[in-house]
Amino acid sequence: MTSNARITDSNIWLIYGAILLLGLAYGISLALVGLFLDALSYTKSDIGSLAVWFALGIVLLSIPMGFVIRRFSARATLIVSLVGYACAVAAFPLMPNFTSIALVRFFDGAFSVGIWVSCETVLLSRANKDNKAFVTSLYSMAMAVGYVLGPLLARGIVALAPMKVAFFVSGAISLVAAALVSLRLASDIPETHAEDASVSGAPSTVAAAARSVIWRIKTCCFATFAYGYFQAAVVLFLPLYLVQEKGIESSRTIIIPAFFAGGMLLFTNLAGRVGDRIGHLPLMRILSVVGGAMVLGFVFIDSFWVMCLAVFVAGATLASISPLSLALQGVVTKPHEYSRANALYNTFYAAGMLLGPAISSRIFDKAGGVPMLYHLAAVWVAFILFSVAFRRDDPRVRRLARASRAAA
């Protein structure tokens, strides 16, 4: 069955187009942020601190974003967030000092999480219950394609113009995405942004509803935390590990992220199809076992090209967990809970992005790259054990268990 046959709602394809454009805008800016700040004589510590401000914007705005969407709709929130991101990224190269740059990076993260939660709410509300992982896998792939093409476009821009122009181009692309959404995206399905009548009113009642949601999506939240933790740490420190402890030239490590992205692009959609058939949580556990083994393999592999293959497999497995966990979340929550669940989900992702580099850098500095890799593998082991303990959180697993008992 083709993807067109499985996805008949044009609004889903519109979200894919918008997120591809956003990924392109992200790819341009992310490829140049470090270089731009380095050219302004900011230290490595300063650059790392500014990355924390970006993640802090995600963390602090994730949970309120659920309320914003329920109050104003995912469509309106998405349009405002895309425009806000465009303003933030275009303002970045114009900021005169560290404080102003930190503030812009904070809003960069805040508007980014508004985009993510809005897009995910639209996708989950419009996807069928039997193809949510398929839909979310294409969402991840669209973003990844933008990430791959963005740096290539950035390289062409800086060859023709000052580096700051690239950030203006990034902002312009985000504005194009905002215009596309504004002109073509249909209004929300009413139940996906209406406040749940049963939890409106007393703060304690709202808090109880949030606790109920987070308990149901706990395995999803752990999965996205582990991925955010791993992704943020490995991007920063795997190249350093290869240079310092494997003796690989730094110029060769530049292509390492391409292998990770390549694995993700080639395998994510297949993982989504399989997850929709056999259950999202069992497949996430299998992928964690394989991906965690690849992380341990980094310790023992000396050949650069074998390392690239291991990174490819890690991308194919661990990066596929993110859309699978998002799909599982869409299955175990009700439509009017999507915005709240997506907000909580992204909070855990951002928390992983905050903690991963901070803890990994300390381990790397104090004990070296090998213990750092062991601790990254341990994060996935912890998720595997957690997913086994709460394996019945996946409705498909519960149905199979009931069918097995009935057959016996």
Image (cartoon, grey):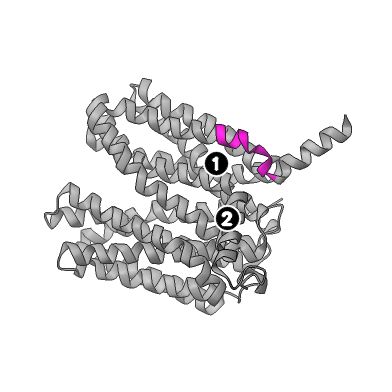
Q: Say which of 295 and 170 sits in front.
A: 295
Quadrant assignment, res 261: top left
Mark 2 neighbour density, 10 Å: few (under 14) some (14–19) many (20 or more): few
Whether residue 277 sits left or right of residue 373 in the image: it is right
Above or below, 161 relative to 46: below
Provide the residue span drawn in magenta.
385-394
Residue drawn 13% across the image and 58% down it: 40
Q: Position of residue 244 (x, y in %)?
A: 22, 29
Q: Which residue is mark 2?
A: 211
SS at badge 1: helix
Q: Is residue 100 visible?
A: yes
Q: Position of residue 1 (x, y in %)?
A: 72, 50
Q: Say which of 225 and 79 sits in front.
A: 225
Q: Residue furthest left?
A: 41
Q: Residue furthest right?
A: 407
Q: Main secondary structure of the magenta part?
A: helix
Above or below, 315 relative to 85: above
Residue drawn 61% across the image and 73% down it: 188
Check if mark 1's residue and mark 2's residue have beta carbons within 8 Å. no
Q: Nearer the viewer, mark 1 or mark 2?
A: 2
Residue drawn 74% across the image and 41% down it: 398
Q: Position of residue 238 (x, y in %)?
A: 32, 35
Q: Say which of 245 and 166 sits in front.
A: 245
Q: Amino acid at mark 1?
A: Phe
Quadrant assignment, res 73: bottom right
Whether residue 96 sits left or right of residue 326 in the image: it is left
Q: Earlier in the sequence, mark 1 or mark 2?
A: 2
Quadrant assignment, res 250: top left
Q: Amino acid at mark 2?
A: Arg
Q: Is residue 21 visible?
A: no
Gap in angstroms between the C-alphas marked 1 and 2:
34 Å
Q: Which residue is mark 1?
A: 267
